[in-house]
Amino acid sequence: MRRSHLALLSASLAWLAVTATAYAQTAATYDDLAKSEAAANAENGKRVAPVKSIGNPSDEVSPEMQAMIGAPYPPHFNADPKTPAEWKELIERRAKLAIAGIPAMKEKLGVKVEETKIAGVHCFVVTPNKMPPDNRRRLLVHVHGGGYVFGPGEAALGEAIMMAGFGGFKVISVDYRMPPDFPYPAAMDDAMAVWKELVKTNDHRRMAIFGTSTGGAMTLAMVLRAKTEKLPRPAAIAPGTPWADIDKIGDSYAGNEWLDNVLVTWDGWLGRAAKLYANGTSLKDPQISPIYGDFKGFPPTILTTGTRDLFLSNTVRTHRKLRRAGVIADLNVYEGQSHAQYQFNIAAPETREAFTDIARFFDRYLEE
Amino acid sequence: MRRSHLALLSASLAWLAVTATAYAQTAATYDDLAKSEAAANAENGKRVAPVKSIGNPSDEVSPEMQAMIGAPYPPHFNADPKTPAEWKELIERRAKLAIAGIPAMKEKLGVKVEETKIAGVHCFVVTPNKMPPDNRRRLLVHVHGGGYVFGPGEAALGEAIMMAGFGGFKVISVDYRMPPDFPYPAAMDDAMAVWKELVKTNDHRRMAIFGTSTGGAMTLAMVLRAKTEKLPRPAAIAPGTPWADIDKIGDSYAGNEWLDNVLVTWDGWLGRAAKLYANGTSLKDPQISPIYGDFKGFPPTILTTGTRDLFLSNTVRTHRKLRRAGVIADLNVYEGQSHAQYQFNIAAPETREAFTDIARFFDRYLEE
């Protein structure tokens, strides 16, 4: 690349960033753009897309969801903590924001939260005030998201509360250990210790595991590990937009980069957290990237993602791999949503829809 | 937009097109890009993505599919025929290419093709040499794709041959009338005339309708019309990446624009064909854009798309709307695929997989 071109492009990009208006398709005529794109894509194996300015999806997406879809990137998307102390400061700062919303959520969804220890691991027991009779003996295990770094304590309880509230299930949420102090395999060890303990007194045919993002990857990795350790397996699982490939491998890591306004890009805090968690273990290890595991014998699985989700490919690769292994697998892709946006606002109809769909799936496959 | 900026950007874009190398993420440092993107996305309701250069998906996608995914845009993606004669010349030219491949496909998949007329409409009867006993009394109706303009005669028989060959079903493929001579509702009138005639002598509980893209939209519109006209409905349908919203409405029309190397953009031949077909009828009419129809009472539906599909949103919007109407709906999204690429090369394992999945779905819901 010649320097003069680089300078020209940089200047142009910088200017684009400042003006931030709809310029892509108006910069040249449409026909000029079509010509330049055709030329840029004349080579095999490489797709080139121009600068794009994309509005919100149409009105069939609720106003509550539109507001989330249209929001600016989160301020921490490119955070680059250099020390354990810097990580902790960032984790703590985000946790406080999340925890602030928990009491109102409990109240609105009508659930009770108690702290407990199971096999020495700190857990929350989330119980809905109203439970359908069919769910009385059923139990869900929740492994939360947050890139293996975010969501300590009550900070990641939102999803467990929504599942308990919208679905009418009792949920055990595992407050597993995380980096920077506890890299892999601490999180998985904690989750498995809880699972092992719970299946002693609960019938695994009445149990499910669920979680989103990192929690989705852990859900898959837990079933892989249950297979290896010959432990009872859950009757169903719901890995929501699972971080199935922790490395930047998968089509949507590129296609939805800068479109997804939750994760934004793997190259920000996300990839840094991946390396912090793996701590030298291969990113191809199925316990780190469960997409590389053997899905044969998995229980029925329901997956959820969105068209702008950076993990769209993580989700659909998991779905196809499950199908290829002969597993019942149900895929749900929400219009316009970025990563995990189906679980950020209990007032959005799409949130209720996603959790209701998962609850119905559990109801179909869990024994009463 | 100031003229000097426009000129700068135009020059930059033109240069990008000539060099066609990986420049997006190398143009500035990653941190500069992150900063400029954050600034460009500071406004609510508008997502701005930079120039992207995206490689092929990972090796779990077959070499045959990788070759399709990595291919340049089709030469006609921005065709703009100004007269009926120009449309016919383009349609004819593309038809010849497609028809050339049909004899080898019939041979390889072991199917027989006969021409016939049903209710005065030209049709093909596609029969597999080997048919499972369960399928002997079952019958599928195929409505082909091609933007309501492409695929006359044998040119769009490929999908019917694949369904017959991979699935072991007898298929009636409707060679419906198309623009420029026959705009809406000719295509739907022909398809419905065939359906009406076939349900006289065949049990609709042993029948399904399928088709991809335009054929997917027609499949949905046929069920809507069967509801309105109180005709028997099929036992299952398979609208593959359906053109459910014929207008440029839906998230992936923007998100996957210039990424999808089959349709590329709505603003090329595709949108022109939409207007030619609608011929003044509202693009919101459910017979033109079935996403605006009432899906209550629809039969079990299996949908197929890919992560780069321009119609990803058409497909997932249809899936969700079906679910919301209480319909059994199964969604399959293939890694890296652009529009309908699951049905372009019978040698790709993903092609066999997609048709086998659809065949299994039909087997589950059609009576023997």
Image: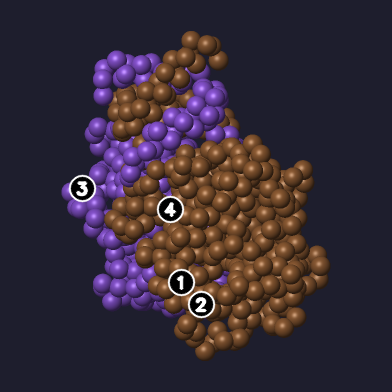
Chain colours: A purple, B brown
Q: Are marks 1 and 2 in contact (CB under 8 Å)?
A: yes
Asked if residue A4 lies left or right of residue B171, the reply is left
**Mark 1 or 3, which is nearer the eye?**
1
Q: Amino acid at mark 2?
A: Lys
Find residue A270 and report its image quarter. Answer: top left
Where A3 falls versus B62 (above or below)? above
Q: CA distance from mark 2 to mark 3?
A: 59 Å
Q: Amino acid at mark 4?
A: Gln
The label shown at residue A279 is 3
**Mark 4 or 1, which is nearer the eye?**
1
Q: Outermost residue, bottom direction?
A: B133
Residue lying at 46% horizontally and 42% vertically, measured from the top left: B75
Q: CA distance from mark 1 to mark 3?
A: 54 Å
Sequence-wise, the earlier of marks 4 and 1 is 1
In the rendered image, residue A51, in percent from the top left (x then y), is placed at 46, 29
Which residue has dot 1 on it?
Answer: B106
Q: CA distance from mark 4 to mark 1?
A: 25 Å
The label shown at residue A311 is none
Residue lying at 26% horizontally and 24% vertically, measured from the top left: A1
Q: Chain of mark 1?
A: B
Q: CA distance from mark 1 to mark 2?
A: 7 Å
Residue lying at 30% horizontally and 73% vertically, measured from the top left: A227
**Mark 2 or 4, which is nearer the eye?**
2
Which residue has dot 2 on it?
Answer: B112
Residue lying at 67% horizontally and 80% vertically, measured from the top left: B205
Residues at marks 2 and 4, common chain?
A: yes
Question: SS for tag 3?
Answer: loop
Q: Chain of mark 3?
A: A
Q: Quadrant of the C terminus of chain A?
A: bottom right
Question: SS for tag 4?
Answer: loop
Residues at marks 4 and 3, common chain?
A: no
Q: Amino acid at mark 3?
A: Asn
